[in-house]
Image (cartoon, grey):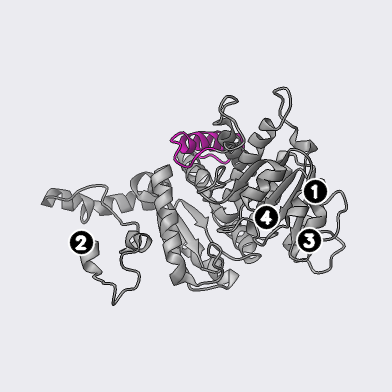
Amino acid sequence: MVAEAFPSDSVSDPYAGDPVFDLHVGGKIEVTSAVHVTNADELSMAYTPGVARVCTAIAEDPSLVRKYTWKSNVVAVVTDGTAVLGLGDIGPAASLPVMEGKALLFKEFGGVDSVPIALDCTDVDEFVETVVRLAPTFGGINLEDISAPRCFEIERKLKERLDIPVFHDDQHGTAVVVLAALRNALRLTGQNGISRAIEDIRVVISGAGAAGVACARILLQAGVGDLAVVDSKGVLSEDRADLNPVKLSLAKDTNTGGLSGRLVDALDGADVFLGVSGGTVPEEAVARMAPGAMIFALANPNPEVHPDIAHRHAAVVATGRSDFPNQINNVLAFPGIFRGAFDVNASRITEGMKLAAAEALAALISDDDLRPDYVIPSPFDPRVAPAVAAAVADAARQDGVARG
């Protein structure tokens, strides 16, 4: 029916016949009924007059809304279209295919229902107020493709005002999967069966946007002691007068070695390169990294260091692409994280829950299976979402945010 509703041919629609566009005809998600109405009695229970009894019960005891509506298992996937994939600020309408895709992945990988919402506003307070007013319908908020530094303020304000999980996947989903892959890369590059200590490595992150800041924060939480973040103007340090508050805060907590200069300077002797910004890193800079280096070049579609070059100088190489081994893919994290949060009715997603998700992901690869081209599970590994969900639920209980 969808194909008939949107007739096209190669003359009127230049995209007709392209398998990617064909997959998107009519959208990628739909609403289906969880119950069926086939007679008058069922109609009277599903809608008026029976539904009024349920409404009254919820009005008297608001906690019943989780049991008697979809709220306990539905996420709002919300964007303003200002930082979509690598396309930039393309607006809310053009962002909708990505939001539909995220909703599809929530359902396919985590059994979580979600609704894509593209907001036609870029003012931080207007965005926050809109989401707050929509929030009674949802059990969680997944922020998506919002430009930095606005995304940090939006997430902070929503967390302050809502008592449901708020999660900016571009930040925290990336960070969780990066930490998991790094844990396994350290296991792999250790000696005599002993993992390298995360405290002993030096990490350089290229990019101080949403993903870069979140990755830096989770790596610091995990124990990395020597970490430098580089933006387009050089290494973040407290001496720079051009830093916004987010970057200045990060500068205070990083760069303990007092590095200065550009990315190529920071990479000299580094153990880990993490690229989340795009651009190209010269091979001569990569060649100066420490022996047994790890290169996570996550820019899409063009990694900062092409894997062919990276493999000449690194023991472990990861990208954000599905056509190379070790794909750092957010779908490994967000479905299980929300599944676990929903299972225990968590009021928020804590740092402990994110760290637990990373540990669970890493643990799925045994010592026997661990190898340079397999430091992170496949998104299609059926163990992923259940393992992440269980770890997140346990961490929620430990952190005191579980309510059931």
Picture disc at residue 1: 2
**Residue 16 appears in the picture as rendered:** yes
**Is 398 within the magenta?**
yes
Q: Name the residue under label 1.
A: 288
Numbered range of the magenta stretch: 377-403
Earlier in the chain: of badge 2 and badge 4, it is 2
- Quadrant housing residue 208: bottom right
Furthest toward the bottom, the residue is 12
User: Eyeballing the image, is 244 above or below 392?
Assistant: below
Q: How far apart are marks 3 and 1 (CA)?
A: 28 Å
Q: How far apart are marks 2 and 4 (CA)?
A: 44 Å
Q: Distance between the residues labelled 3 and 4?
A: 14 Å
Q: Name the residue under label 4.
A: 212
Q: Residue at x 62, y 36 (%)?
A: 372
Earlier in the chain: of badge 3 and badge 1, it is 3
Question: Closer to the observer: label 3 or label 4?
Answer: 4
Tell me: 19 left or right of 214.
left
Whether residues under marks 2 and 4 lie with C-beta atoms below 8 angstroms apart, the answer is no
Whether residues under marks 3 and 1 lie with C-beta atoms below 8 angstroms apart, the answer is no
Q: How far apart are marks 1 and 2 (CA)?
A: 58 Å
Earlier in the chain: of badge 3 and badge 4, it is 4
Amino acid at pointer 2: Met
Q: Mark 3 points at which residue?
A: 248
Q: Where is residue 375 in the image (x, y as percent from the top left)?
A: 59, 36
**At numbered mark 3, what does the secondary structure look like: helix, strand or loop?**
helix
Question: Closer to the observer: label 2 or label 3?
Answer: 2
Q: Position of residue 184 (x, y in %)?
A: 64, 34
Tell me: 393 left or right of 115.
right
Q: In which quarter of the image is the N terminus?
A: bottom left
Q: How crowded is mark 1: few (under 14 residues within 10 Å), some or many (20 or more)?
A: some
**Residue 62 appears in the picture as rendered:** no
